[in-house]
Image (cartoon, rainbow, N blue to C red):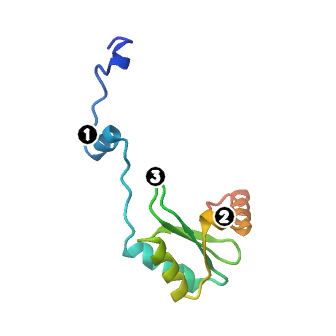
Amino acid sequence: MSWMDRFRGGSRPKMKGPARDAFRTGSTRVRAADGVDQDHLQQFVEARKGVEGFVEPRTAVSDVTLLLVAHDGEWTRRRVPSVEWAHKFCNRYQVPSYDAAVVGIPQRMRDYNRRKKLEGGAPG
């Protein structure tokens, strides 16, 4: 392949499977929320105190997610079916819920991540 073929679309690397389609169209494939995600969120809420929910909107690379942050900053994030589902989930478990795009992420979560990094552990 000559140097100019790169600009003319000459011989391109051949990709197989779903990656080829995502590469060609410029789109990404986002895994949908499932029962395992919902079970994890429920277990997190039931096992911790002072949990708050932060609903994160859909982006180009991620579907709607629910970020749960406990009183000490421990956190978990999972995909959820919709923004409405996330707020209903929080209401069902008496967890205050906020739109993360409006209020941001709580400082206690960042502090928790910093502590974990200093301890050598992985946050979340």
Is 12 drawn above or below residue 78 in the view shown? above
Q: Is residue 122 left or right of residue 38?
A: right
Residue 113 place in picture, x, y as percent: 68, 62
Q: As rendered, which of 101 and 31 lies closer to the eye?
A: 101
Compare marks 1 and 3 and give the one earlier in the sequence: 1
Which image quadrant is residue 38 in? bottom left
Compare marks 3 and 2 and give the one earlier in the sequence: 3
Q: Which mark is residue 60?
A: 3
Residue annotated with mark 1 = 16
- CA–CA distance between discs 1 and 3? 23 Å
Q: As rendered, which of 55 and 119 lies closer to the eye?
A: 55
Say few, some or many: other residues with alpha carbon within 10 Å of mark 3 (under 14 / 14 to 19 / 20 or more).
few
Residue annotated with mark 2 = 104
Q: As rendered, which of 99 and 12 lies closer to the eye?
A: 99
Q: Amino acid at mark 2?
A: Gly
Q: Quadrant of the N terminus?
A: top left
Compare marks 1 and 2 and give the one earlier in the sequence: 1
Q: Secondary structure at mark 1?
A: loop
Which image quadrant is residue 105 in? bottom right
Say few, some or many: other residues with alpha carbon within 10 Å of mark 2 (under 14 / 14 to 19 / 20 or more).
few
Q: Nearer the viewer, mark 1 or mark 2?
A: 2
